[in-house]
Amino acid sequence: MKPTARGAFAAVMTGVVAAVGAAAVAPAVAADTVPVPVPSNGVEQSLGVKAPKVAGELPLPLPGRLEGPRYVEGRTIPDRAMPQVPLSGGLPGADVRTPLPHMVGDGFEHLGLSAPAADLWTLTPGVSLDGALGAPDPDHLGLPGLKQPQAAVLAPLVRAVPTANLEMGSGA
């Protein structure tokens, strides 16, 4: 095999390996939440009782697309001089099941609470400013007129719909 053919073959193989490696990493990066198990096997074995089963989910925050400043006619400074940054993620989730030794009556052997991770969307605060100079005024030889400067703080936004399920029933 000639050295040029070997180099081309090595370049193709490097590209294939990089593509396969990127494909293998993509599912781990694309996860929305990270499961957090809480081990309780040691408590069950050492005390000889059934321990509650606890598990959780932690969301990964993801930045959104930034809306930059935009020009508004009649203003010297663009609207939203400090833009609001959208972030999406989630509220942590939990799953708790604890055994009940027939405290409530026959047929009720466990108490469970399931609160899955909920989507959360936020928008950071922003600033909107306008200077003291207005648009050019033809009555004053094209010089800009004076006006009151304006400053506004854009309020942050939070949007989420958390849910939970409380259950009591038979079974462990």
Image (cartoon, grey):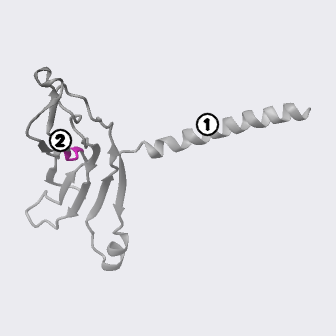
Could you tell me which residue is drawn at 36 percent across and 66 percent down? Answer: 39
Q: Earlier in the sequence, mark 1 or mark 2?
A: 1
Judged left or right of residue 103, residue 94 is right
Q: Nearer the viewer, mark 1 or mark 2?
A: 2
Judged left or right of residue 61, residue 137 is left
Q: Which residue is mark 1?
A: 19
Query: In x, y percent, where is residue 74?
Result: 16, 27
| Image quarter in which the N terminus is found | top right
**Contact (CB < 8 A) between labels 1 and 2?**
no
Query: In x, y percent, where is residue 44?
Result: 32, 72
- Crowding at mark 2 (Cα within 10 Å: few <14, some 14-19, many 20+): some
**Is residue 121 inside the magenta stretch?**
yes
Alpha-carbon span between mark 1 and mark 2: 47 Å
**Is residue 22 inside the magenta stretch?**
no
Quarter-of-image position of residue 169: bottom left
Is 142 placed above or below 2 here? above
Find numbered disc 2 in the image and state the secondary structure of the residue it sits on: strand
Q: Which residue is mark 2?
A: 129
Is 164 placed above or below 16 here? below
**Which residue range is magenta in the image?**
120-126
The residue closer to the viewer here, 108 or 146, is 146
